[in-house]
Amino acid sequence: MTKIGIVGGTGYTGVELLRLLVGHPHVQLHAVTSRAEAGTRIADLYPNLRGHLDLSFTEPNLEQLSACDLVFFATPNGTAMQLTPDLLAAGVRVIDLAADFRLQDPHSWQKWYEIPHTCPELLSEAVYGLPEWHREAIAQARVVANPGCYPTAVQLGLLPLLSAGLVDTDSLIADAKSGVSGAGRKASVGMLMGEVGESFKAYNVHGHRHLPEICQELNRVVDRPVHLTFVPHLLPMIRGIHATLYATLVKEVSNEELQEVFTQRYADEAFIDVLPFAGHPETRSVRGTNRCQLAVHRPQQGKQLVILSVIDNLVKGAAGQAIQNMNIMLGFPEKSGLNHVGLLP
């Protein structure tokens, strides 16, 4: 069995990794770290894992982690880059669920995350882990930067249109909404039920940290800078992202041709579900799964397109996509450990 380590096992993405990995047929959890909970049985902190996992949290230990074949970092931004060089030197492959390796420009990293990057030499090597677009590079990677949740939903909806050269790259809009688990498990007054319940708001309209990540990847496809207006919102629910994306056509195409752009591009993708034209995906349909549901709309048959994209922010937007990347890196069937049906109601 392949030995897996998780650095940072107490947050929402960490426990989601644990939930998914305990059912994976090809891996064995070897080490799960937490400075605050070291010595605590994992199943005592997360009773949903009782009977599935008999491990305790440990302090981060390079020797123990170096015995793993692959290590996930489910840690705050700035943590993975501290340990990754030593793990790579020990022959361990790394998947970071935070942002340490998502931006290829260290100056952009420092601007948006307000700390210097400690191993900028690895940024050009790190592969951006959106499997539907970078599968071949992921398979060979030593370091994979797992995409953010908003960027996953936005890119899966816009990239087919950009790749086909059908839309104006200067007027893209992403109006995206997330459940509160996207903010993490840390204590925060703004995330209390009494604060978010029965309310709905936009935040970071001036500029969200996911914006440069999204633009970097969209730029790669069109080979020039795109202009994207990205506005995130907070929904009074736990899981899910709904991205409503706007793009303006620059070519004459039929509705059938628009639909074909998506169905053909994602025809062989196990985790992308393209609904019939003008469908309405819902976050509950993908809750608990590694799937993204997409639908294309063309209001009043005009030039303005609306693409709807929904994911579970903790699965396809984090832990599930990380395991999908692991499967590709280690040569496992890509769907291993990820065959889940959406939770209804």
Image (cartoon, rainbow, N blue to C red):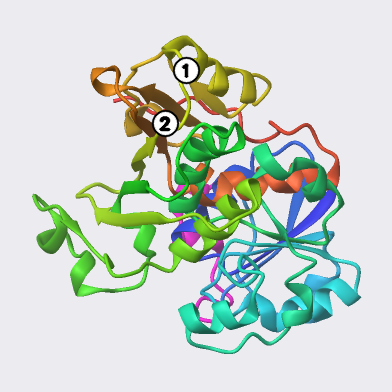
In the displayed structure, 33 sits above or below 17; it is below
Q: Quadrant of the C terminus?
A: top left
Q: Is residue 40 magenta?
A: yes
Where, by quadrant of the figure, is residue 205 drawn? bottom left
Front residue of this view, candidates 160 and 191: 160
Discs 1, 2 touching: Cβ within 8 Å: yes
Percent from the top left, x then y, of residue 228? 41, 54
Mark 2 neighbour class, 10 Å CA radius: few under 14, some 14 to 19, many 20 or more = some
Front residue of this view, candidates 249 and 81: 249
Callout count: 2
Q: Residue at x 64, y 61 (%)?
A: 55
Indicate the amino acid at tag 2.
Answer: Leu
The residue at which mark 2 appears reads as: 249
Indicate the amino acid at tag 1.
Answer: Val
The residue at which mark 1 appears reads as: 253
Q: Which residues are magenta?
A: 35-50
Mark 1 and mark 2: Cα distance apart in space: 8 Å
Percent from the top left, x then y, of residue 129? 67, 51
Percent from the top left, x then y, of residue 286? 42, 31
